[in-house]
Image: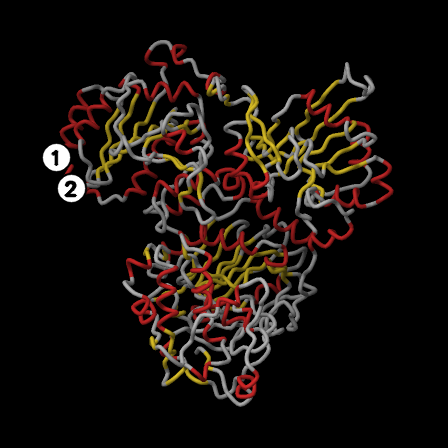
Amino acid sequence: MLHLLAFFSLFVTTYAISRDDLLVVSIATEETDGYLRYDVVFIQSPEFILDKFQTFKPARVVFGAEDFCWPNPELQNEYPEVESNRKRFLNSGGFIGYANDIYELITSQSINDDEDDQLFYTKIFLNEFSRSKWSIVLDTGAEIFLNLNGAIEEIKLEVNGDEVYIHNTRTDSIPAIIHGNGPSKRSLNYLSNYLARVWSPTLGCLQCKENLLDVTSFGEVTKWPIVYMALFIEYPTPFLREYFENIMKINYPKERIGLFVHNQVDYHKNLTEQFLSKFKQEGYKFVKYLSVDDDTTEAEARQQAIKECQDDKCDYLFVVDSVVHLDHPDTLIQLMTMNRTVIAPMITRPGKTWANFWGDFSDDGYYKRSPDYLEIINHEKLGIFQVPHVAHCYLISGTLLQRFTPRYDDANIDPDVKFSISMRDSDWKARYIHPDYYKLLEPNTTIEQPCPDTYWFPVVTKEFSQSLIDMMEAFGGWSGSSHTDKRLAGGYENVPTDDIHMNQVGFDEHWLFFLRDVIQPIQQKLYTGYNSDPPRAALNFVVRYMPEYQSKLRPHHDASTYTINLALNDVGKDYEGGGCRFIRYNCSLSATRRGWTLMHPGRLTHLHEDDMFQNINYSILYGILLFIYITNGDNFAIIDINIDNDNEDDIELIKLKYEKIKPSDTRHPAIQADLINCTWYKSEACCKRTEVASVFESMFTLHQCSTKCRNMINYMMCFFCDPNQFLWYIKRKVKVCGSFCNQLHKECKNAEYNGNVISVQYKSGKEFCEAQNFQVTSSDCFDFDENVFSKTMSFLKFKSYFLFILQILFCIYII
């Protein structure tokens, strides 16, 4: 889709450019829920941009450039070569040129809404005729446009008087326009705290004086905004009396405040109820109390406060936890004055570096200190700062709550962390997640069950489903319903469909995130006792049913713990018929609903056939299928997959249990060129790609670990690939060198997995290894070889006499 939604027009008067020409700067935008979202910041003046544009003469159109050839990496060799300190590939997030040239360029070819605009411009640029016709060049030195993705380490914030600007140290340039493309939006938010004259080293916060709300304009008390004040006592809290007294001192008309109180601490019950009586005497609009006897969890209570505020169309929700003491009575009014959708006062602990916000977060979602964190909490920098996480005290505008519902309910993370994640994700969820989805998470919601243990519920919007269909049709690589399938490890599909795998279009990681963030909460509610974080889905694909290709599927089990089927288009409009019959229960489901998911168990119980597809009599039926595997284990590395291991489908399912490892009477060491991990064994391996994938996908994620720690854990978990197993696999036990265990324990002592710190969980390397069912010895044992992780070695070089012996040895394998 062409993104020409925002223009920055410059009429030239005193410059050497013709007065009759109009310059246009195009920047990337998108529309979400009626709001334009920008990931571009102008940090220099129009005059500065014009001066820079003139340096590109005789160019008529200048595109930004980046280090990634996107969206088609195969085109990279068609680009002109550039110097090492330049950026080679076109990025269409920002470009500048003369209006006539840009108009001709855009209208020179047709483009559909589902096609990629960057690919459109790339093809025009790579065509020598069109590149010459419109004098198109790339801003390889980031003189005007800086695309942040891949460039974060190149830039420095610098100061010149009252101005804060960016210096690109790689290209030695001062860009005028910053584009937070791809995954760099987090960095763009941080930089936006200082650029474009929102903050000054001498004057401080400049944006603090803009777009303020005049609270004196409210007039008589009956016209003041209604505030829902949500008070949460979730932990035993010292000085709780003072906390309540500070709440009562807040300078705001009490008849315009409704109090929502949740107490989860039995010790605080009497004191809390004493103050509830005082609150009622003070004339608050209402006082609602959820006591410890109500057995309401923190997440449920916080979610209920959001819902009641929405139902009553409150103007603000003000959250104050018991760990916060508001010593300034005007805090609420000051926050309102700033006129932001979500704003928090900075809360600190005297003498500590703790605060109620994060300056940044790591790639796996945990706290990370930002460069300015200490300056902010020490009051060396004052102002309003965009941050990725706030907790314990914040004000939410009711206008936001009327179009978006923040979430607290997630069994795997803290409610406040979930809240901030949901706020960061609000744009895409408002666009793509079905508005009724969140009702499913409420405790008393009943989800439709059309067949036994088979559930039906809304998940995504019509826009989402249509966008995905358009993307898949544009890709066009449908498999054609053939049993022969080169995409699979074995090359054979037992129950073929006409489909496209998500990894073919680069969406596999996105779908695993979707599975964890959207599907897993519902799964845990419906199938209690099945928990895995993250869940594992080895095969995710969009399927297309057409009468000429496939009218039905034979009875089959899915190779999964549970399966989800997501309908992408409309019955009765796009197709007729369609459905699924569960043979064991003689129960059929027809008339699927667009954007709704059908979830059912996989093996053993839910043998099914899609025989109703023979009734499709026009157009096409689309759907998404995900096969999900739930894993449970006793420790962070050894997982027992609770699925029968037969060969019904093409996916190999491996039951891991070290005490069941035994010599194979059929497998020899062999070349395994497609290993995705343990790659140093490619030339001679006792494992298969699917086995390796199963082991590593089933491991808990390691946090706070060094590279060497990660390498050692990786190496240890690859033991079953080693062709030298005959040396240390004795009497059904894997013998691991004590030195390996001790070194691993030392390197990984601070690493965390599944909420546990290794050095706390295991007091020694020997204890760690024995907990993994290894036998710890000092000779003839499996030992660490750090050379395999060096840049110069990609596989182990075995001695020749080992190779000779291995010709007649079998491998151990996992059953």
Residue 634 lies left or right of residue 685; in this view the side is left
Q: Residue at x 77, y 14 (%)?
A: 14
* Structural distance between the alpha carbons of marks 1 and 2: 8 Å
Nearer the observer, 130 or 289: 130
Where, quadrant-wise, is the C terminus in this rendering?
A: bottom left
**Which residue has dot 2 on it?**
266
Where, quadrant-wise, is the N terminus in this rendering?
A: top right
> As displayed, is residue 176 above or below residue 649?
above
Amino acid, disc 1: Asn
Residue 393 lies left or right of residue 59; in this view the side is left
Q: Residue at x 38, y 42 (%)?
A: 417
Amino acid, disc 2: Asp
> As displayed, is residue 351 above or below residue 434?
above
- Is residue 450 visible from the viewing direction of this image? no
Q: Tell me the element at label 1.
A: helix
Q: Tell me the element at label 2.
A: helix
Q: Residue at x 19, y 41 (%)?
A: 265
Determine crowd level at label 1: few under 14, some 14-19, many 20+ residues with C-alpha closer than 10 A: few
**Which residue has dot 1 on it?**
270
Where is residue 140? Give x, y as percent: 71, 39
Where is residue 363? Give x, y as percent: 47, 48
- Is residue 337 visible from the viewing direction of this image? yes
Where is residue 399? Give x, y as percent: 45, 27
Q: Residue at x 35, y 63 (%)?
A: 745
> As displayed, is residue 253 above or below residue 555?
above
Where is residue 508? Give x, y as percent: 56, 56
- Tag 1 and tag 2, C-beta contact below 8 Å: no
Residue 481, disc: none
Q: In the figure, residue 488 lies in which quadrant?
A: bottom right
Q: In the figure, residue 621 lies in which quadrant?
A: bottom right
Residue 377 lies left or right of residue 695; in this view the side is left
Q: In the figure, residue 794 lies in which quadrant?
A: bottom right
